[in-house]
Amino acid sequence: MDISVKLPGLNLKNPIIPASGCFGFGREYAELYDLSLLGGIAIKSATPQERFGNPTPRIAETPSGMLNAIGLQNKGVEVIKEKELPFLAQFDTEIIANVAGATEEDYVKVIEALNDSEVIKAYELNISCPNVKHGGIGLGTKPELAAHVTKLAKAAAKKPVYVKLSPNVTDIVEIAKAVEEAGADGLVLINTLMGMRIDLKTGKPLLANITGGLSGPAIKPVAIRMVYQVAQAVNIPIIGVGGITSAEDVLEFLNAGASAVEVGAQNFVDPYVCPKIIEDLPKVLKKYGYNSVSEAVGRSFK
Ligand code: ORO
């Protein structure tokens, strides 16, 4: 069965994309399997300058999930361009750059730096990182701010812009519509849910950052609900993400209205999860009576 998916700027041979922050730049996974098997790869966030991220501890386990407070650690867009993109160029898969920053100007700077890269096929505007004091979620929780940074990004970008939305809002539909109106080519939802754990030995927060972003199977129903609500309100494609561990989970996201998916935390549990899902997906689609990915998209409300 052909499970390819065409989205703005992206010719995905299958709808499976490892999620940003859970796959680095693919180097460790490339030791385990051929990255050309993947539909695409959303690489770790790039900011204009190098960031060391938050102090440790910045990871904690939770039932059916994990908390992270990495703080957008990365080497800066120029180093990523010089050192990581040439490595990724050898694979036949679509590379998506996750774009982050502390200010609106930072987002534009990263986009301008990557516009001439042949490796990057699309941008994923990260206005939903819950772990930084400036930028990130601060731009993604108010419709006007989300729309404004999207407009600036679209004006600067020579490739399609997908906007990655935060679930830490009262009404995600309102944000999605504002971003669509501002010119976004697609949406990615959801980023992590803000959470917290306490270390009982000290009575203090377990993460040095105090709060962190919750990911993993625990958040899947929240992500499905948001994809379902947003898919009925917008006309741009949605890449669904949140707690996917199997091809059945992928089908659930497709039925809710996603056109493709990203797989995040499960890569830490099973580094082979993406190729396994890719192998299983045609069988699962067939089992539930579908002959293509597109037939399954939005089935829950169509
Ligand atoms: N963590 C998340 O959960 N989401 C992001 O977008 C970024 C981070 C991080 O770098 O801390």
Image (spheres, rainbow, N blue to C red):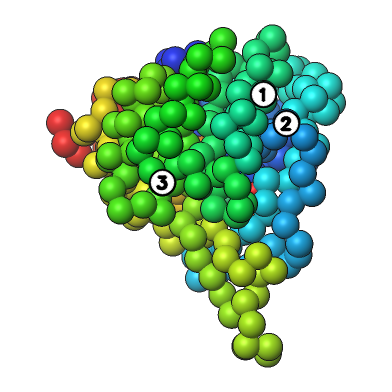
Q: List the residue tagged with mark 3.
A: 141
Q: List the residue tagged with mark 1.
A: 109
Mark 2 is surrounded, within 10 Å at the Cα level, by few (under 14), some (14 to 19) or many (20 or more) other residues, namely many
Q: Are marks 1 and 2 in contact (CB under 8 Å)?
A: yes
Find numbered disc 2 in the image and state the secondary structure of the residue it sits on.
loop
Asked whether mark 2 and ligand 1 are closer than 8 Å, the reply comes as no
**Amino acid type indicated by mark 1:** Lys
Q: Using the rendered image of the protein, determine whether residue 265 is visible from the camera's viewpoint.
A: no
**Amino acid type indicated by mark 2:** Pro
Mark 1 is surrounded, within 10 Å at the Cα level, by few (under 14), some (14 to 19) or many (20 or more) other residues, namely some
Query: Between residues 210 and 135, which one lies in front from this camera angle?
Result: 135
Q: List the residue tagged with mark 2.
A: 48
Find numbered disc 1 in the image and state the secondary structure of the residue it sits on.
helix
Name the residue at 68% across, 46% down: 72
Find numbered disc 3 in the image and state the secondary structure of the residue it sits on.
loop
Give the Cα separation between the discs numbered 1 and 2: 6 Å
Name the residue at 16% across, 36% down: 301
**Furthest residue to the left?**
302
Q: Which percent across, then down, holds residue 256?
A: 28, 39
Name the residue at 28% across, 48% down: 171
Mark 3 is surrounded, within 10 Å at the Cα level, by few (under 14), some (14 to 19) or many (20 or more) other residues, namely many
**Amino acid type indicated by mark 3:** Thr
Q: Which percent across, then down, holds residue 224?
A: 33, 47
Give the Cα separation between the discs numbered 3 and 2: 22 Å
Q: Are marks 3 and 2 in contact (CB under 8 Å)?
A: no
Quadrant location, the C terminus: top left
Q: Using the rendered image of the protein, determine whether residue 193 is visible from the camera's viewpoint.
A: yes
Asked whether mark 3 and ligand 1 are closer than 8 Å, the reply comes as no
Q: Which percent across, then down, holds residue 33?
A: 71, 34
Q: Are marks 3 and 1 in contact (CB under 8 Å)?
A: no
Q: Quadrant of residue 272?
A: top right
What is the number of the mark on residue 127? none
